[in-house]
Every structure is written in structure tokens, then in C-alpha cells.
């Protein structure tokens, strides 16, 4: 796994595929970091991307969609003990639908 980057000073060049991004962070401009950037942790490297770039915005949309899809898929895989309590009327409806 790649180390965390303290601060991007310049933007990286080259393409980054959505499937290669393991995670990303948003860097805001401040006293330590002179530029706003999206820090992309890929399988092979750490890239600093310009958040105003059209291709970077599209990549972020895809990454956020992937995150939502993954969270939704994972939600159904949780053990039943972690689910919130169901009201009695919903339990009756569920029992009618649930077939073992």
C-alpha cells in the first residue's frame, strides 16, 4: 500500500483509470499546501490531480458512484445482529415474504 502524501505541490500528468484507484483524498489550499488537489492512491503510485480538470471531475463521479454501490452491496452482507430492530408490523410482512 502506498504511503500517505503530506502535500501535493504540483499536478501529476498522465491518465488514471478508475479501477486502479484504491482511495482518494481532497487537499485544500492552505499555509502548508499551495494548491487544491485530489490525491489519488493507485495500485502503483500516488498522483496529484487538478480538481478543476474535466477528466478529474468525471473520475471523481465514477469513484463516488463506486463507493455508493459498494456501500449498498455491503449493507446487505452484514450479519443480522447488526441490523436495526424491526417493528412488529414489518416483521409480520417480512415473515410472509421470507422463505427458508
Image (cartoon, grey):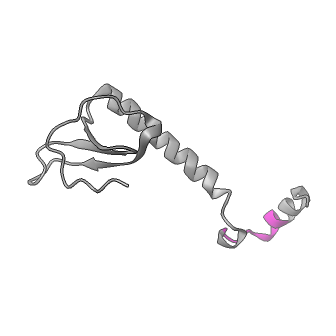
Q: How many marks?
A: 0
In the image, 65 versus 97, the foreground residue is 65
Split into 4 quadrants, where in the image is the C terminus? bottom right
Q: Is residue 62 visible?
A: no
Left or right placement of residue 13 versus residue 92 in this view: left
Residue placed farthest to the front in the image?
Answer: 44
Which residue is found at the position 36% from the left and 43% from the top?
Answer: 44
Q: Which of the pair 98/96 is nearer the observer?
A: 98
Q: Position of residue 28 (x, y in %)?
A: 21, 48
Instruction: Tell me, yes or no, if residue 13 can be seen here.
Output: yes
Looking at the rendering, the stretch of residues picked out in magenta corresponds to 83-91
Foreground residue, 79 or 43?
Answer: 43
Tell me the residue at 32%/26% (across/down).
Answer: 54
Left or right: where 74 falls relative to 17: right
x then y, percent, for residue 86: 73, 68
Decide: is 98 above or below 88.
Answer: above
Q: Where is residue 43 shown, x and y percent of the image?
A: 40, 45
In reply to whether residue 93 is colored magenta, the answer given is no
Which residue is found at the position 75% from the left and 69% from the top? 87
Q: Quadrant of the N terminus?
A: bottom left
Q: Is residue 89 above or below residue 43?
A: below
Q: Position of 68 compared to 17: left or right? A: right
Q: In the figure, residue 88 lies in which quadrant? A: bottom right
Rendering coords of residue 25 (x, y %):
32, 50
**37 lies left or right of 56:** left
In this view, the residue farthest toward the top is: 54
Amino acid at each position: 500500500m502506498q504511503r500517505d502524501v503530506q502535500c501535493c505541490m504540483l499536478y501529476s500528468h498522465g491518465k488514471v483509470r478508475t479501477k486502479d484507484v484504491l482511495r482518494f483524498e481532497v487537499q485544500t489550499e492552505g499555509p502548508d499546501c499551495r494548491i487544491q488537489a485530489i490525491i489519488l492512491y493507485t495500485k502503483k503510485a500516488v498522483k496529484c490531480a487538478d480538481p478543476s480538470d474535466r477528466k478529474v471531475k468525471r473520475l471523481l463521479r465514477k469513484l463516488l458512484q463506486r463507493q455508493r454501490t459498494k456501500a449498498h452491496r455491503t449493507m446487505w452482507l452484514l450479519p443480522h445482529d447488526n441490523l436495526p430492530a424491526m417493528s412488529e408490523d414489518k416483521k409480520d410482512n417480512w415473515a410472509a415474504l421470507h422463505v427458508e
